Amino acid sequence: MSDLLSIAASGVRAYQTALNTVGDNIANSGVAGYSRRSVTLNEVTVGGGPTVSGLESGIGVLASSIARSSNSFATQAMRSAGTDLSKTTTSVAWLDRIGKALDGNNIAARVTGFFNSSDALAAEPASSALRANFLAAGENVGNAFKATGIAFDQIDSDLDGQATQTAQTLTSLGASLVRINDGLGRTKAGTTAAAQLLDQRDVILDQMSTISEIKVTSDTIGRTSVQLSSGAGVPFVSIGQSNAVRYVRDNAGDVSFQVQEGAGWAKLDPTGGALAGFVEGAQRASAARDAIEAVATKFTTDINTQNRAGYDLNGNAGGDLFMTGTRPTDISIPTSVTFKDIAAAAEDLPGNPGKSRGTRDGGNLAQFNALRLTGLYESNVTSIVTANAAQLKQRSTIAEAQTAIRAGAETAVSTASGVNLDEEAIDLMRFQQAYQASSRAIQVARDTLQTILDIR
């Protein structure tokens, strides 16, 4: 009877563990990052030796381990999809900001207004009102370029802040992964605690993969090492140590990410994740800014050159209408320039060189329209805006496709390691019946033993 009692007791213990595991699965069925667990049940034998009756028999059942459901191939596919999607969505965000900076201040429309006011003044060059309108239109152009430059300054500042924060987040994730590695080394494999640590590990690796492309290697108990970027990669996390990641913008405006390597820093060339999106966004912002500054430089240079070729209301040779500050987009009309300084009149050639044709002459202003045709200021600005919009549209389309790919990969992971409530309900009934049967066997053993003891 003692054998029956111990066998039934082992069943109660084993199926209690199984019921607890099923209950844990059901309770966490909606928790992100949770992987289904199952109990591995093994028969306990006496080592193959014969019993008194000469027949071999077991001595119960043992819940030997808690198995965690996972699929390394599906998980890797999900991380890769997340890496690609994060790069694209980050790039889309900055392309959108660039588009708003380029188009939000209506540079092309302000330039058009400037040349329209020039045409009106050329027809009536002595009009004080039209001269004031011309200067006001020039101020509008300068303000539009200046506001665009400020918008790009804000883009650079925001990108620097977010990129720095993302690098710090990646560094923090690396430190957390080292702590999990330490925990796995101290925890018995095949236990609920080990499964919980492995779930936390996978959540961290998934977060890392959205920041940078990662290469992961694991030992037999799940402790993980990580390298960043593709190919051989840059060492980031070993089993017992993690390195820091930082963001750098140099004096030339070029941006990069670096990984601590001993006493120095190794340059990281991200090909995926948010880090790659930041680098791409910074490069596109720099290229767009360079393009708009080239238009600004050509516009101010051409207008100033042409104004110097004419004569103002006082009959003096014209000077510069525009001045620029630190950046080519820092355009303004000096306060010293008045409506009398607009060099509307052309030189009185060939009979009277070096002299103005008079206050009612608009020959020099008429040349502004020729500048408009050859300088292509408005069309160049429009081309810059259109090119950025086309890139944004292309990236947005790619992002939609990658979102679908990521969703499919998540479904595959969920199928492999997620909780199926129908299956859990079946296991719950099965283990409950086994538990009840084991409990009943204990009762039978006790009753039988009591009957034997009651024999006089």
Image: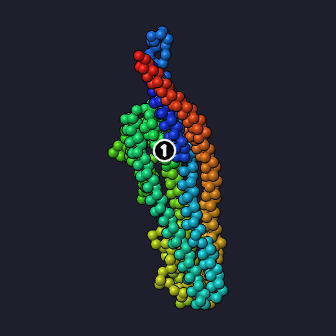
Across and down, in percent, residue 327 comes to 48, 68
* Quarter of the view holding residue 176: top left
**Would you say residue 99 is visible in this rendering?**
yes
- For numbered disc 1, what is the local secondary structure? helix
Across and down, in percent, residue 423 comes to 59, 37
* Quarter of the view holding residue 194: top left
As displayed, is residue 281 above or below residue 302?
above
- Taking depth in this image into account, of 4 and 144 the one nearest to the observer is 4
Across and down, in percent, residue 395 comes to 61, 54
What's the amino acid at mark 1? Val
* Quarter of the view holding residue 357: bottom right
- The tally of labels here is 1
From the image, tell me which residue sits under label 1.
Answer: 203
Mark 1, residues whose alpha carbon is within 10 Å: few (<14), some, or many (≥20)? Answer: some
As displayed, is residue 139 above or below residue 226?
below
Across and down, in percent, residue 65 comes to 46, 30
Residue drawn at (58%, 64%), measured in percent from left and top? 99
**Going by the picture, which residue comes out furthest to the front?**
456
Pick the quarter of the image with the C terminus. Answer: top left
Residue drawn at (53%, 56%), measured in percent from left and top? 281
